[in-house]
Image (spheres, grey):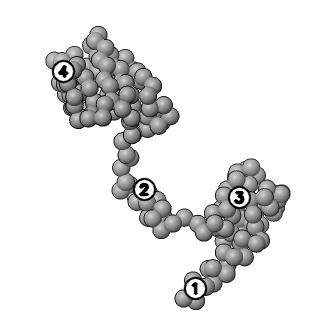
Amino acid sequence: MRIRMERQNKDLAWKTEHTAATVALLDRDGLVALWSEIMGSPAPRGMSQALLHAFLAFEVQQRSNGGLTKADLDRLERIGIGKVRAKAPNMNAGARFLREWNGVTHVVERVAAGYLWNGKTFASLSAIAKEITGAHWSGPRFFGVNKATAISNPRAERRAPTTSRKLGANA
């Protein structure tokens, strides 16, 4: 209980003493001193003044607003040790995927029930990629889908690279 009270008092002092605006006013010597105060170690030697400003402003804001939640800290820990897999991109109905394979252009459309290709509905892009190539592929990789494109413009047509891999007798 005593440690918790000390932390609350320290956080309250941070709220009144430091803000992102006050950090922006510091010169390099002030930033280095603040780094030592916050981190309990000397500032990295090669870190630029702009990076010190940005890092310390973030740290001050985070501490004044209560910091990361326990769930966030646990997730970061799992990511750090490699126990979290990247989530597949969330694609909305209406998204279209184009892929040329062995001279044939394949068009897949995202529908509410899955993925529509050649008049049939499939549960995943991987199942379609296997139908097209005859070999197991990661469907999102085969169609060139990545998290950034799926989030930035979910309805835009995407064209994967048109180079094809040689897959045994199916090439």
Q: Label 4 neighbourhood size at 10 Å, few (<14), some (14-19), many (20+)?
A: few
Identified at 70% across, 59% down, the residue is 56
Q: Where is mark 4, residue-wise?
A: 168
Within 10 angstroms of label 1, few (less than 14), some, or many (20 or more) residues? few
**Local SS, label 1:** helix
Residue 125 relative to residue 146: left or right: left
Q: Position of residue 60 (x, y in %)?
A: 69, 64
Numbered tag placed on residue 3 in the rendering: 1
Alpha carbon of mark 2 to alpha carbon of mark 1: how far? Answer: 28 Å
The x and y percentages for residue 47 are: 70, 52
Q: Say whether residue 17 is visible.
A: yes
Q: Position of residue 91 (x, y in %)?
A: 38, 36
**Residue at the image position 58 percent from the left and 89 percent from the top:** 2
Number of the front mark, 2 or 4: 2
The amino acid type, in three-letter code, at marker 3 is Ala
Tell me where residue 131 sits by quadrant: top left
Could you tell me if residue 45 is visible in this image? no
Label 2 CA crowd tier, 10 Å (few <14, some 14–19, many 20+): few
SS at circle 2: helix
Q: CA distance from mark 1 to mark 4?
A: 65 Å
Above or below 142: residue 22: below
Between discs 1 and 3, the one toward the N terminus: 1
Nearer the observer, 91 or 59: 91
Query: Of callouts 2 and 4, which one flags the residue occurring earlier in the amino acid sequence?
Result: 2
Mark 2 or 1: the one toward you: 1
Q: Which mark is residue 57?
A: 3
Q: On screen, 122 above or below 84?
A: above
